Amino acid sequence: MYMVNYTSDDFKKNLSKSDLVIVPVGSVEAHGHHLPLGTDIFSPRLFCQRIDKKIGDEVWIAPEIPYGQSYDLSIYPGTVHIPSGVMANYLYYVGKSMFNNGMGKIIFFNGHGGNINALNLASERLVPLGLDVAVINWWLDYSKEILTVTTGQGHAGEDETSAILYYDEKLVNMDKATKNTKKPLIKVRYKNRGKEIFENALTGDATLASKEKGEKIFNILEGKIIEFIHIMKNGKYYTS
């Protein structure tokens, strides 16, 4: 159920169907020379479309939050960077307003790694209100499943490029696809990290991507994500 397609009256009338809302979160950011700036928006969008088609009466889908924390890639044209603190505050107030509108559970469906800190900070603040909060980082949480399809992962790499080829291959310029084999030795932040580690605004090997691989990724992950949603709806978050 896409929230924005309902009138205020119809939203109130249908609220009894579900108190769970998915909020897609992405970024506007450089992805190599071959992928669109909206890559991190498009993957969550397609997952939500598939979720709505399968279990649309069981979950609300909120409008996308298109901007994210993109400091490392902000050296590349077209990238929009929102600091984590600012973004966390914004996400908190989005979640708080959802709670005030009758939502008891929220899933932030994230398409961008730079958002993780902000999402975690916002989640910590939302839980005391009475919300159950979860974050799905689709490429990270389901890395094991993705690697049954691709040989590697990366920013604008094989997996992400395959996903966007499946979303809309007209948006991908595969003749500009390249690879970047640099891998960080440790997790450290420093000023020139975006230029050095994310050379040409990518990591991994985009040349290995295909539309077929993207379709397989979405087919595999769709069931996993729906299972996740059903656990959230049932409210039993552990086994004994």
Image (cartoon, grey):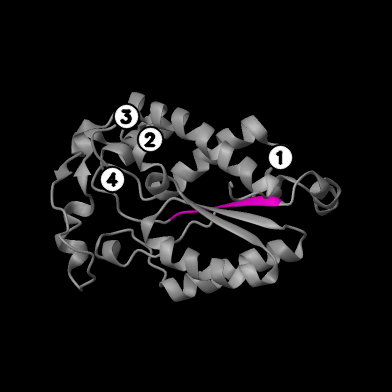
Q: Disc 1 to disc 2, how far (Cα)? A: 25 Å
Mark 4: give few (<14), some (14-19) or many (20+) Cα within 10 Å.
Answer: many
Compared across the picture, whether 178 is left or right of 59 comes to: left
Determine the residue positioned at 31% across, 38% down: 159
| Whether label 3 touches label 2, CB < 8 Å | yes
Determine the residue positioned at 71% across, 45% down: 5
Label 4 or label 1, whichever lies nearer to me, is: 1
Q: Mark 1 is on which residue type?
A: Glu
Numbered label attached to residue 126 = none
| Quarter of the view holding residue 143 | top left
Q: Disc 1 to disc 3, how far (Cα)? A: 29 Å
Label 1 or label 2, whichever lies nearer to me, is: 2
Main SS of the magenta part reads strand
- Is residue 93 visible in the rendered image? The answer is no
Determine the residue positioned at 41% across, 27% down: 215
Ranked by sequence position, the earlier of labels 4 and 2 is: 2
Write down the residue under mark 4: 156
Ranked by sequence position, the earlier of labels 4 and 1 is: 1
Numbered label attached to residue 58 = 1
Label 3 or label 4, whichever lies nearer to me, is: 3
Q: Disc 4 to disc 1, how far (Cα)? A: 32 Å
SS under mark 1:
loop
Ranked by sequence position, the earlier of labels 1 and 3 is: 1
Write down the residue under mark 2: 145
Write down the residue under mark 3: 149
Span highlighted in magenta in the image: 20-26
Q: Mark 3 is on which residue type?
A: Val
- Is residue 6 visible in the rendered image? The answer is yes
State the residue in front, 62 or 140: 140
Q: Mark 2 is on which residue type?
A: Glu
Residue 71 pos. (x, y %): 31, 67
Determine the residue positioned at 25% across, 60% down: 76
